[in-house]
Amino acid sequence: MSSYSDFPEKPILAKPSENSNWGLTIFSIILFIGFFLFFFDREFEFIAHLVLVLIIHEFGHFIAMKRFRYKSVKMLFIPMMGAFVQGYKDKYSQRESLLVVLAGPIPGVLFGTICFFVANYYKIPSLLNLSVLFLFLNITNLLPLDPLDGGQLVKLIAKKRTDLFLLVFAFLSSLILIISGFLMEIWALTIFGFLMGVRVRNLQRSMIQRKELDEQNINFVTTYNDLTNAEYATLRNFVLENNSLLRKFITHSETVDETVIASYVQGLLVAPVHYDLGLFGKIVVISVWFLATLVLPFLFLLLMRNDIISIDWYFMTSNY
């Protein structure tokens, strides 16, 4: 019978850079602006407003991630797609993850609401344009679709970490995005939906692999650092058995870089999530989501219908 000492030491993987790489962030913003100016050179005010809205939204995520000590936190802008903040932790907290998700759209909704009333009171067309963009983008981002923030909320509150749930949710989200983009003739949205379809295919492959791991009683809900040498050896064998390209590459190589195999092993792992949000916390999160996505738009429509607020002046003073 083999003991843990019979297995060779697992490789030590290089840690990602802890720096936020602001140079890359600034470059992506310049590229984002340049791309829009190339196609919409007369819409400078709209582009400036769009960049401001995205920066405030993503800074909310960024600050929350930094607060909860996420590693390698970076903010990037993608032309015609938007922006995102990425970072990771070895082990996640449900409560912290929900706060990270909400830290983007909720400040945006608040900024948009304040700007709207200030613009209406002082009759400032430019500020009204900005407020509408704030509200539209952040409320839309709270829709329960993957990979929007609203979709992340659904997955975190539902506590569904099974591959089948993630696969079905991602498929339905991509289908809705494709159809919505087609009906509204927003082709960037349609393209994004098709790109989501590629992710669905990857999720399907992961589901098949992890089902096999479950059937073999191999633990994969853990971090790479927490893997014992025996567990690593088991997962290593699984990777080589199920990846013919990697197996051929190793067979025809004079020397084997074990860290390459280790990176594939790490890709199989699912980061553990500690579900530490109680019933009261879930009610608060759902209430905030409900107020931002349903109550607030209805309230604006009701106030305008009853002439409590009016934007008729906007159409008389604005060039849009």
Image (cartoon, grey):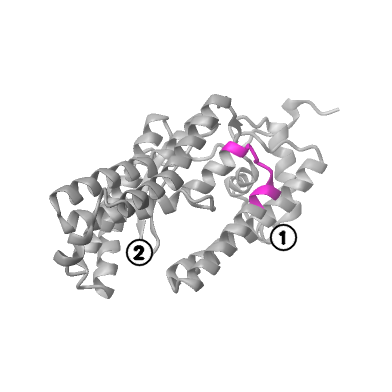
Specify the amino acid type for callout 1. Answer: Ser
* Residue 125 in view here: yes
Q: Is residue 204 left or right of residue 100?
A: right
Tell which of 218 and 158 is nearer to you: 158
* Residue, far right: 1
Locate the C terminus by quadrant.
bottom left
Specify the amino acid type for callout 2. Answer: Pro
Q: Is residue 143 left or right of residue 221?
A: left
- Measuring from the top left, give residue 13's x and y in whole percent: 53, 40
Where 200 falls versus 287 (above or below)? below
- Measuring from the top left, give residue 310's x and y in whole percent: 24, 54
Please give the residue where the numbered disc 2 appears in the rendered image.
Answer: 79
* Magenta-drawn segment: 157-167
Q: Does the magenta portion include 296?
A: no
- Measuring from the top left, give residue 235's x and y in whole percent: 71, 42
Q: Residues within 10 Å of mark 2 (few under 14, many from 20)?
A: some
- Measuring from the top left, give residue 199's x and y in whole percent: 58, 59
Please give the residue where the numbered disc 1 appears in the rendered image.
Answer: 244
* Number of numbered callouts drawn: 2
C-alpha span from label 2 to label 1: 36 Å
Which secondary structure dominates the residues rendered in magenta?
helix
* Residue, far front: 306
Name the element at disc 2.
loop
* Residue 25 in view here: no
Tell which of 117 and 201 is nearer to you: 117
Q: Earlier in the sequence, mark 2 or mark 1?
A: 2
Q: Residues within 10 Å of mark 1 (few under 14, many from 20)?
A: few
Taking the spot 57% from the left edge, 58% from the top edge, the residue there is 173
Locate the N terminus by quadrant.
top right
Name the element at disc 1.
helix
